[in-house]
Image: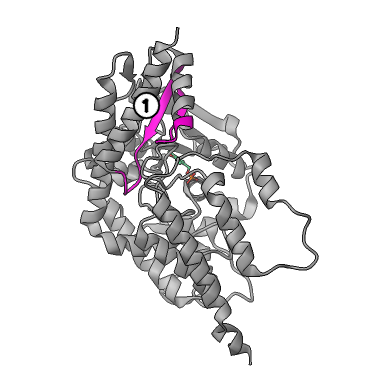
Amino acid sequence: MATDRFASAVFDEYLEKAAGHASAYLRTLPDRHVGARASREELLQALSVPLPLKGGEGGEVIDLLAAQVARGAVACNSPRYFGFVIGGAYPVALAADCLVSTWDQNAGIYAISPLVAVVEEVAAQWLLELFDLPRESGVGFVTGCQMANFTCLAAARHGVLRRVGWDVEADGLAGAPRINVIASAESHITIDVAMRYLGLGTRALQRVESDGQGRMRVDALREKIASLQGPTIICAQAGNVNTGACDPLREIGRIANDAGAWLHVDGAFGLWARASDAQRHLADGIELADSWATDAHKWLNVPYDSGVAMVRHAQDHRAAMTSAAAYLIQTQGAERDAVDWVPEFSRRARGVPVYATLRALGREGIADLVARSCARARQMAELLAREPGVRILNEVALNQVLVRFDDDDDTTREVIAGVQADGTCWLGGTNWQGQAAMRISVSNWATTEDDAERSVAAIARVFRSLRKRP
Ligand SMILES: *Cc1c(COP(=O)(O)O)cnc(C)c1O
């Protein structure tokens, strides 16, 4: 009987094996060398065989993979991982994500998974409440902020052209009125990529200067807008990937409204400032925008991959994304079909870990997560600033810190490489306004004061040893 296959011990055996490996991995996180230890060649040696003709035992394959993680993976969910902007999964988020794989639901349409559709409907409302954005907005659960930016800008493209009588979904862009797209010099690269996906082209991006913290300059925006006519989209940002700074969103919102432009905000992590009393003012005015892109796999600490696209004008959002086909059983009532809000057709139920995490943490838990990350960033900046030769390059208002050593590019890069090799923590580098800098991003729920101290001690140790060299 077919059911025997599922009653068999195989699932139990494999899942227990996987759970064992998972717990063992998680237990190593607080103390393991944070960086990877194996080269591509070493990993290939362990993993690369000719495609097997006859398969092997599944449990052995699981063991084999698990055996490589200690040296092959960077522990980017370690509490002392400060690279890029990366969270580590909360226990409840990880557990919910395991259920998502187990249930194996195609979350594209309601008819395939009423459960997931309703979970995502509720999670969508919670997010709008948490960020205090218009409750009637459209919401799509996508893979990350790249696709959230794409989805929002597709809605924007539809919206601004609809208002001048052009149906871009039916007629495309050939012959369409030209769309002006404005972004600051500091917009994230995923805005450029979205421009490519949307057929608008990166050269169409009109750049507006930014200030010393990477914030869009309002005077430059005013000047730019005054020189333009026709459909216009402004891309602003909450959370500069280097400094964490947010654009002056209230002023930009007023300018956009006055000009009849669509305002999009890339708030990959900065939007989460709205969840905390102490940080909310940084994203003040963000509610004036027409669309918002954010990540859940960064600051909400759900497993990869998870982003959210939100659009004030739900009809524009839906028109840009919806798919209809004769065989699709689309809902007639209030039921929610995810295909109407995201670029994917078949998709993973990635709203489920978002629901679980929001429900388990509550408003206070999320506020605390945001405030704690910012406090750890401040702590690291303050400790580092005491060290002779160390300079903090940004105003540490959110969770990002930029550090420079001996005011020298080479020294700064050597410290970064030395810290990566040391393994106490992991962080990367950047070029901030012409100068090499170390980037510290605190986005993990598990990072403690002690982790911050240990990491600063490691950074200082590496720097001092470089300075002592003859
Ligand atoms: C991380 C980030 C993105 C891209 O998000 P992904 O989740 O990697 O797709 C876009 N914008 C900003 C400001 C970011 O920090």
Residue 271 image point, x, y percent: 33, 44
- Residue 246, visible in the rendered structure: no
Give above or below for 398 relative to 115: above
Residue 20 image point, x, y percent: 47, 64
**Residue segment shown in magenta:** 421-447
> Which color mode does the image show?
one colour
Left or right side of 260 for 142: right
Q: Quadrant of residue 250?
A: top left
Give above or below for 431 relative to 308: above
Q: Quadrant of the N terminus?
A: bottom right
Q: Tell which residue pokes out farthest to the right in this image.
A: 53
Badge 1 is on which residue? 459
- Residue 168, visible in the rendered structure: yes
Left or right side of 152 for 369: left
Q: Is residue 310 magenta?
A: no
Left or right side of 72 for 218: left
Q: What residue is drawn where x is 74% and y is 68%?
A: 55
Looking at the rendered structure, the kind of residue marked 1 is Ile
